[in-house]
Amino acid sequence: MNCVYILQSIKLNRFYIGFTSDFNARIEFHKNAECHKFTANADDWVLFLKIPCENKTQSLNIEKHIKKMRSKTYIENLIKYPDIILKLKERYK
């Protein structure tokens, strides 16, 4: 299943945004810190949000949109206001 996922590190006070078609394998990849330059900087990454998508194109477009916003507040608002996610899914259908 394709999805966009957001990981959070409290230690770094940062988010990591990605998309994948195999969520479990991708999370294991991030847990192996030496493999991934960005997530290797901390060992406290936890899943903040997972957005199921209809296809790879939708996942990629939503990921790009969130990254383009460059805002922690926007990411936090995805949890506070679930309608934002629904609008993103509709926009990138």
Image (spheres, helix red, strand yellow):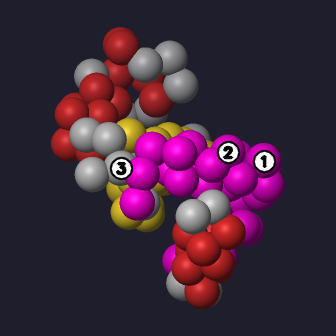
Q: In which quarter of the image is residue 62?
A: bottom right
Please give the name of the residue rendered at 79% of the width and 55% of the height, measured from the top-left corner.
Answer: 69
Q: Which residue in the structure is indicated by mark 2?
A: 64
In this rendered view, identify the residue nearer to me: 48 or 21.
21
Callout 3–callout 1 Cβ contact below 8 Å: no
Question: How far, Cα to Cα, is label 3 from label 2?
Answer: 15 Å
Magenta span contains residue 71: yes
The numbered mark at residue 25 is none
Q: Which residue in the structure is indicated by mark 3?
A: 2
User: Is tag 3's residue or tag 2's residue first in the polypeptide sequence?
Assistant: 3
The numbered mark at residue 68 is 1
Number of disc labels: 3
Callout 2–callout 1 Cβ contact below 8 Å: yes
Circle 2 residues within 10 Å: few <14, some 14–19, many ≥20? some
Please give the name of the residue rendered at 53% of the width and 53% of the height, measured from the top-left corner.
Answer: 58
Question: How far, Cα to Cα, is label 2 from label 1?
Answer: 6 Å
Q: Is residue 33 at least partly visible in the picture?
A: yes
In this rendered view, identify the residue nearer to me: 91 or 28.
91
Q: What stretch is highlighted in magenta?
A: 54-79
Q: Is mark 2 on a helix, strand or loop?
A: helix
Image location of residue 75, percent across then percent down: 64, 64
Q: Is residue 38 left or right of residue 20?
A: right
Between label 3 and label 1, give the one nearer the viewer. Answer: 3
Image location of residue 57, percent across then percent down: 53, 45
Q: In which quarter of the image is residue 26?
A: top left
Q: Is mark 1 on a helix, strand or loop?
A: helix
